[in-house]
């Protein structure tokens, strides 16, 4: 199970590492789009756009539906929860460390003010 979870996180962060894929996800947040519509704003070939879409599909963030010859994509943001949960752990870690640093610096300032 840990391996599966690790592979899923790897796929999520790999998919999010590319600005084109992040932009595609943002576009899909507005509703379903065809592969051609997803590719249109980017200076890439349809084949390259399709590779980006496949990467997002492997991460589980896009669902593709075929209607005749048209491939339509829809956002599935559920896998992002795993990525957010992973990041939140480290957010808590750093918040605790920074709070401790702030307290230590405040104590140091108080010690300097006392004669």
Image (tube, rainbow, N blue to C red):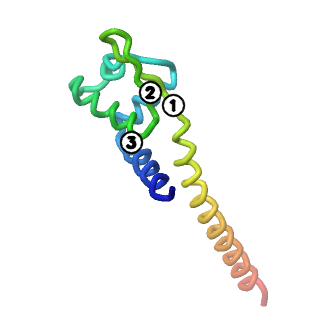
Q: Does label 1 or label 3 sit earlier along the sequence?
A: 3
Q: Which residue is mark 3?
A: 15
Image quarter for residue 102? Answer: bottom right
Q: Secondary structure at mark 2?
A: strand
Instruction: Tell me the residue at 41%/51% (across/down).
Output: 10
Q: Does label 2 or label 1 sit earlier along the sequence?
A: 2
Vertical order, 8 against 65 (above or below): below
Instruction: Tell me the residue at 39%/34% (across/down).
Output: 57
Q: Is residue 69 left or right of residue 75?
A: left
Give me the C-alpha separation between circle 1 and circle 3: 13 Å
Q: Secondary structure at mark 1?
A: loop
Mark number, residue 55: none
Q: Does label 3 or label 2 sit earlier along the sequence?
A: 3
Q: Which residue is mark 1?
A: 76
Give me the C-alpha separation between circle 3 and circle 2: 14 Å
Instruction: Tell me the residue at 63%/67% (across/down).
Output: 98
Q: Which residue is mark 2?
A: 63
Give me the C-alpha separation between circle 2 and circle 1: 7 Å
Q: Nearer the viewer, residue 25 or 101?
A: 25
Vertical order, 83 against 73 (above or below): below
Q: Secondary structure at mark 3?
A: helix
Q: Nearer the viewer, residue 98 or 113?
A: 98
């Amino acid at each position: 199970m840990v391996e599966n979870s690790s592979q899923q996180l790897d796929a999520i962060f790999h998919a999010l590492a590319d600005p084109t894929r992040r932009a595609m996800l943002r576009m899909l947040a507005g509703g379903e789009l065809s592969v051609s519509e997803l590719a249109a704003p980017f200076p890439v070939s349809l084949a390259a756009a399709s590779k980006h879409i496949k990467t997002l599909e492997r991460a589980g963030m896009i669902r593709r539906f075929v209607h005749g010859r048209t491939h339509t994509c829809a956002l599935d943001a559920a896998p992002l929860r795993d990525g957010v949960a992973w990041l939140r752990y480290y957010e808590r870690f750093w918040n605790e460390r920074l709070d401790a640093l702030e307290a230590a610096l405040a104590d140091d300032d108080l010690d300097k003010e006392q004669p």
